[in-house]
Image: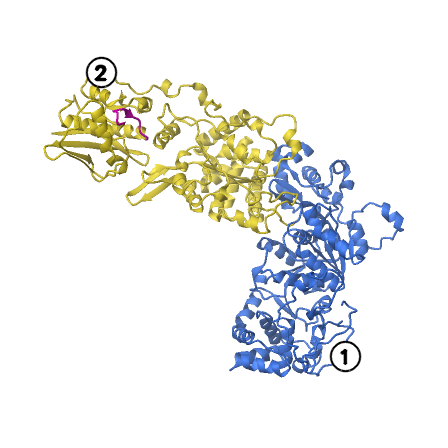
Amino acid sequence: MLATVLAATLRGLEGRPVRVEVDVAPGLPGFTIVGLADAALRESRERVRGALRNAGFVHPPRRITVNLAPADVPKAGSALDLGIAIAILVGSEQVRPCGRWAMLGELGLGGEVRPVPGLLPMIAALARRGAGRVVVPADALDEARLVPGIEALPAASLGQAVELVRGRRVRGHGPMTRAELIPDETARTIPTPSDDEAWPDLADVRGQAEARRALEIALAGGHALLMIGAPGSGKTLLARTIPGLLPPLDPAEAHEATVIASVAGEGPVRSLVTKRPFRAPHHTASYAALVGGGPRLSPGEVTRAHHGVLFLDELPEFDRAAREALRQPLEEGRIAIARAGGSVVMPARFQLVAAMNPCPCGWGGDPSGRCTCPPGLPDRYAARISGPFRDRLDLWVGLPRVAPAALLARGDAEASAAVAARVAEVRARQVVGRGRLAGRLAGRALRAACQLDVAGEREAIRLAEAGGLTARATERLLRVARTIADLDSAERVEVRHLEEAARYRVPATAAAPSRAG
Amino acid sequence: MGRDGARGEWRTAGEPGASVDQRSGIGPGAVIARDSGRPESAVGRGAGPASGGGDPRGGSLATLPASAEFAEVRPRSAGPTHGALSVDEVDAWAVLVAVDGIGPVTLAALLAALGSGRAVLETAAGPRGPRRLAEAVAGRGGHLDAALGRAIADAAIAAPVLVARVRALGIEVLTIESSDYPGRLRLLDLPPPVLFVRGDLAALDPARSVAIVGTRRATEGGRRIAGAIGGAVSTAGAVVVSGLAVGIDGAAHAAAVACGGRTVAVLGSGHERLYPRAHGHLADQIVAGGGAVISELAPDVGPVPGTFPRRNRVVSGLADATVIVEAGERSGALITASWALEQGRECFVVPGPLDSEQSVGCNRLLRLYPGQARAVPSVAELLEDLGLAGGAARTSPDRRLLRGGRAVGPDPGAVLAGLGAAEAAVARAILPRAATLEELMDATGFAPATILAVLTRLEGHGLVVAALGRYAPAGTLAATTPHPRRLGPRGAAATPPAGR
C-alpha cells in the first residue's frame, strides 16, 4: 500500500519540503529510490534496511519504491532516512499512523535517530508548509525549538519515532521563549572568553600603536583591514583579539547566523548564536572551502563569517582564484555559487581582516637592511594581491618589528574592554544614524554622511591628488575618515580626520622596503 | 689610462686579424677582474685625450681612431671638422645605435665606410643592403657580421617608427658631434656616440658634478647618509649624478631634488622601459627640477643585467668624483668605483662597520686602492675634499683630527622653523632616526590620532616618508646632517642610527 510522510532537504541555506511516498507492492523483493537523490541518499537504503531489522521490525520482502517529490528538486543528505523508514513501516502495514507526520533525521544501523546539518532551515521550511508537529532527533531538540510555530517531538530511536507516529507518548515541545533564546543577558553587551574558546586581550599586545588604532577603526566602521608586517610583529595576535572586541549580533543577524551554524554542521545548535563569527581559515584552504560549494553546496568560510570577521593570515599565500572570488562578497555581501544543477546564493557580508609579510623572507622594510630578497622581489610579492582586490581593502597598516625595550616595558596597554566599548558605541551610532556601517557607505550616501565643509573638501581633493587616488580609493579615504570622526564624536568629517585616514592608504609600493629618501 | 694615458691608435687597415669589435658595450668583467692597477683591456687601447690630440688626421682613411677623435675623422660626410650634424643625420645615428650589436666601434666603422649615418641606412635599405654594407666595411679592413647587416637593414626600414617614438617621448638625441655633448664623457675611452636625453642638456655639463652611488639593498642609515651627501653637494652647487636605482641612488637623487638642486639620472634601460618603475615619479621630479634623465640605450631597450654595468661607466664618466655610500660584496656600485678610477676620476668611499653586509664592498675598496679611493669621515670633510666647501680655511692636520663633522647641508633648525609647533615637534622626533608611532607618542606626548594627522601633513611637504609603520625623514629633512649632536636636547638624547 502507499504511505506518505513529509520531510525536507537542504539547498544552500534554504530548506525545501519533500514528500516521501513509499509504495510497498507485491513482486520480486527490491528497494528503489527515485527523485534526484544524491549518493548519501542512495545509501539511505542500507541504513533503513539495517535500522528496521535491528529495531525489531521487518524489512518487507517485497517491491519497495520510494518516490521523493517534487521530482525535479535535487535531494541531498541523510535527513530523509527517518521519513523513508516510517513510510515503509506504514506502507507494509506494520504501523498504523494517527494523522499526518513530518519528520527529519538520519538513522543508524541500530535504529538510532541522529541529528543532521541544516535541521533549522529544514524545520523552518516545514513550518512554512504548515506542518504543526515535526519529529526530530532527540539530540537536536534545542535546535528545532528555535523555530517559532512548531511543536517539536524528540525521538532518540526508530522505536520512539514509531510510538510517536502511533499517537502514543506524544509530549511535544513548543518553541523557545525569549528568555530561553537569549539565556544570559550579560551576553548582550561585551563578549567574555569562555572555557571552550579563549582569545587574547589587547592588553597582551605590545607596541604596535598604529596597528591597534587601525584595528579599532576597522572594527568600529566595518572596514576591510590589511596588516603588513614581519613575522613575529604581532599581526596574528592582534587579529586573535578581534572576538573580544566585537559587539554581539542583533536579533535579526543572530537568526541568520544560527541558520548558517546549523547548515555548517558543526554539531547541533543549542541556542541562538549571538557571538559575532570570527573565522580564520588556513591559507591552504581550497576554493570550495573558502567560497562554498562542493557536492552538497555547503557554505564556505565567507558565509560562515557572515556578520562577523573573516581573517586571512598570509594573504598572498592563498589560492589566487579563491582570493579573487572574495571580491563579489566584499562588494555585494553575498556569494553566488553556480553549479550544473542550478545555482544558490548565500549571504556573505563579512568584514575582511588580512595579514601578510612584506616580502618572502619577512625582513623587508626593516631598517637593518637584513632582507635577503633580491631587489624587486618584495614588489612582486605584494603584486600577488590584484589591483581590484586592493581597492576593496579600506585600511592598510604596516607593523614594524617591536623593539625589545617595548616588549619588556612596564605598564599595560589599553585592555580589550575599553576598546570594545568604543567599537560598540560607534557601530550603534552608525547603524542607527545612517542605516549601515561606514564601511558600507558609498556614493551620495557617503558624501552626505561626511558633511565636509569647504576646508575639508579642499583637503580631501588635495590628498586625493597628491596620492594619485582613484575614485574608489578616494571613497575609501572618506569612509575611513567618517569612522575616525565618529570615534572622535564629531558630527562632520574634519581636516584632521582626513589626514589621519590618509595614513592608512596603500603604500606607493605595497612593500615599500626601499623607497627613495 | 686616464687623461694622461699614452695615446693609442687603433689601426683597422693593413692590420690582419684586427676586426671591428662588435660588442655593443664594454664588458664589466674585464674591469672587475682586475684587482689592482689598471691594465689595458682590448677596448681600452684606443683611448686618448680629446684635448691633447690635435693630430689633423681628417682625411686619413687608413686610420679609424676611436673615442674623441670621432669628430675629427668624419669630415667627409659632415663637412668641416666639428660641423653640426643635420637633424636627419642625428636621427640616423639614433636608429643605428638602437640596433642590437652596434656599439661605438661598429658605428665608427660604418660611418667611416659609408660616410654618414644616412648613407648607411640608405645602403642597408636598398637592394642587397646587408651585403653592400659588409663589402663597404670590408673595404676598410673591417668585418661586418651578416646577421648584424640584416639587423641594420631591418632597422633602416623601421627607422621612421623609432624616430617618431623618440619625438613623442620628448627625448632629445644628443650625438658626440654636438657641442652640447658632455665634455666629461668625451674624455672616456669609447664614449657613447649617442645619448637619449630627457630634461635640460645644461645639467649634463655643469661646472661641478658628483656621482653618488651605492647598493640597492641599502640600510636606513645608508639612505640617510646618501641623502645628506646629496643634499650637501646639491646645496653647494654641484650636480648629483646617479643611477636612479632604489636604495642609495634614489636617496641621493631625492635629496638633490628636495634641496632644489640639479641631478642627472643615468638609466640602465631605455626611457620607455624606465627601471625601477617605482621611480617613475622621481624621474619626473628630476626633469621638473632642471635636471636630466639620460640613457645611451634606445627607448625600447628593457632592463637586462648587461646594461647596468655599461650604465655605471656613464655615471662615473659624467662626474668629477664618485662617492660610494654603501656597497655589498658584489654591488654594482663597485663597478662604478672601478670605472671612476679607470677614468682617472676621484673616488670617495663611506666606510662602514666590519659586520655590515652593506659595507663589505666599501671597506674592501679602501683596502685595495689606498691613495686612490679615499674615505669619507664626514659630510663636511667630503665637501672640503671635493673643493665644494666654499673657501673654508684649511686647518692644520692635528686640529682637523680633533674637529667634529660640521653640518654643511641645510640646517635642520631652519627647516623646522618653517613648520607649525606640532609638525616641528614630530619632525624633530624623527630627525635622529626613523621612528614608529609609539616612539613618536613617547617623544611628543601627543595622541596617536594627532600624530598620524601631523605625519600626513609632513608627508605632504615631502619631509617624511613612511615604510611599514616606521617614519623616516625625507627631502630637505633627510638632507640635513646625519649627526644628531646639533639638534638640541632631544636629538642629543637619541642614539645615532643603528649600524652607523
Q: For mark 2, what is the residue?
A: A169
Q: Amino acid at mark 2?
A: Arg
What hue does chain B carry in this figure?
Answer: blue
Q: Which quadrant, please, contains the N terminus of chain B?
A: bottom right
Q: x, y percentage for residue A233?
A: 58, 36
Of residues B349 and A325, the one drawn nearer to the viewer in this rendering: B349
Which scheme is used to colour this image of the protein? by chain
Q: Quadrant of residue B499?
A: top right
Q: Which quadrant, please, contains the C terminus of chain B?
A: top right
Q: Is residue A387 visible?
A: yes
The answer to whether residue A487 is left or right of residue B289 is left
B82 up-or-down from A192: above or below: below
Of residues B270 and A388, the one drawn nearer to the viewer in this rendering: B270
Query: In this picture, which residue range is highlighted in magenta?
Result: A108-117
Q: x, y percentage for residue B220?
A: 67, 45
Q: Chain of mark 1?
A: B
How many other residues sit within 10 Å of disc 1, few (<14), some (14-19) or many (≥20)? few
Q: Chain of mark 2?
A: A
B154 up-or-down from A78: above or below: below
Marking on residue B224: none
